[in-house]
Amino acid sequence: MPFENLLLRDQGGVRWITVNRPAKLNALDASVIAELARAVEDASADISVGAVVLTGAGEKAFVAGADIAEFVGISAEAARALAQRGQRLFDAIAALPKPVIAAVNGFALGGGCELAMACHLRVASSNARFGQPEVKLGLIPGYGGTQRLPRLVGKGRALELLLTGGTVDAATAHAWGLVNRVVEPGELHEAAQKLAEEVLAVAPGAAARCLQAVTIGLDLPLHQAQEHEAALFGLCFATEDVREGLAAFLEKRPARFTGK
Ligand code: COA
């Protein structure tokens, strides 16, 4: 089935997924959420895809939030279900065994900030702005923002953004550890693609296990997380890629990883 609100294209093993509702600053309505879920599942299953970049269409916004128009008049129960639907999608993005990079090309507010935070890495253009302005609407973030923001920037900074509904620019987001890299708007595409290719150059199984160790481990007590890490470390030694990586180092040549 074709996508109505997403643009998809592949570049050298990288699946670019662009939310394409620029007239509404790429706000996430129910159909965008459903299409993103399908696109993420497709990217996960497609063996030709090694990494994913998520971005927004136009120069103004990455994603300016959940679609506010859809909130009007809904019941508490429906709102809870809506939040759970969004959380399922963002959890699926965070759990993808392939690196997912947000290329943040403007406003990343509310659900947009939450979407960027569900990605594994974030590259921002210098005109990007981040924030969780939900309190200004009388609500709170519902797609994981109250949990992922403090995990990324610490409780104090997270509460400042959550309680004031204010925004930070890309430079501040960088200083806070909310984004990995900041580039000029015209360089965003190349920078995100380059970062994806850097990850594609390492052993894919090792990258997947790093993602799993961090994503699952951060939610566990330290000793359990380290047990999980040790198990994943052990699994690496059942791969051809570890033999290749070690041999290549000792033979002073570049490794040729196959993902096996
Ligand atoms: N949901 C639905 N529509 C949205 C939206 C959202 N989250 N964010 C922007 N839009 C729509 C606007 O309603 C407007 O539509 P219209 O032209 O049909 O009236 C269009 O996108 C352009 O936005 P506009 O507000 O005119 O642009 P701006 O440059 O003046 O302001 C923002 C940009 C991002 C500051 C402003 O759009 C905004 O505050 N958006 C909401 C952010 C938010 O609260 N997100 C959390 C939602 S829970």
Image: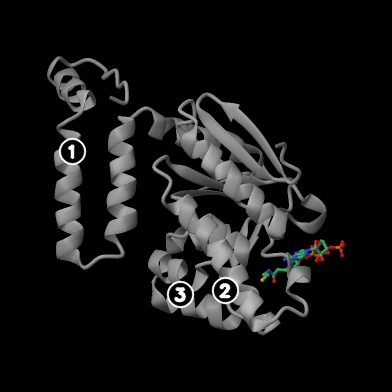
Tell whether circle 2 marks a residue whose Cβ is less than 8 angstroms from ligand 1. Answer: yes
Answer above or below: position of 142 versus 25. below
Q: Nearer the viewer, residue 234 or 120?
A: 234
**Callout 1: helix, strand or loop?**
helix
| Total residue callouts | 3
Q: Tell me, yes or no, if residue 28 can be seen here.
A: no
Q: Residues within 10 Å of mark 3 (few under 14, many from 20)?
A: some
Q: Residues within 10 Å of mark 2 (few under 14, many from 20)?
A: many
In this view, the mark in front (1 or 2): 1
Q: CA distance from mark 1 to mark 2?
A: 37 Å
- Which kind of residue does numbered mark 3 sit on? Arg
Tell whether circle 1 marks a residue whose Cβ is less than 8 angstroms from ligand 1. Answer: no
Which mark, residue 184? none
Quarter of the image where the N terminus is located: top right
Image quadrant, ligand 1: bottom right
In this view, the mark in front (1 or 3): 1
**Callout 3: helix, strand or loop?**
helix
User: Is residue 54 rendered to the left or right of residue 239?
Assistant: right
Question: Mark 1 sits on what residue?
Answer: 235
Question: Mark 3 sits on what residue?
Answer: 157
Give coordinates of residue 24: x percent, y percent. Answer: 79, 58
Q: CA distance from mark 1 to mark 3?
A: 37 Å
- Which kind of residue does numbered mark 1 sit on? Leu
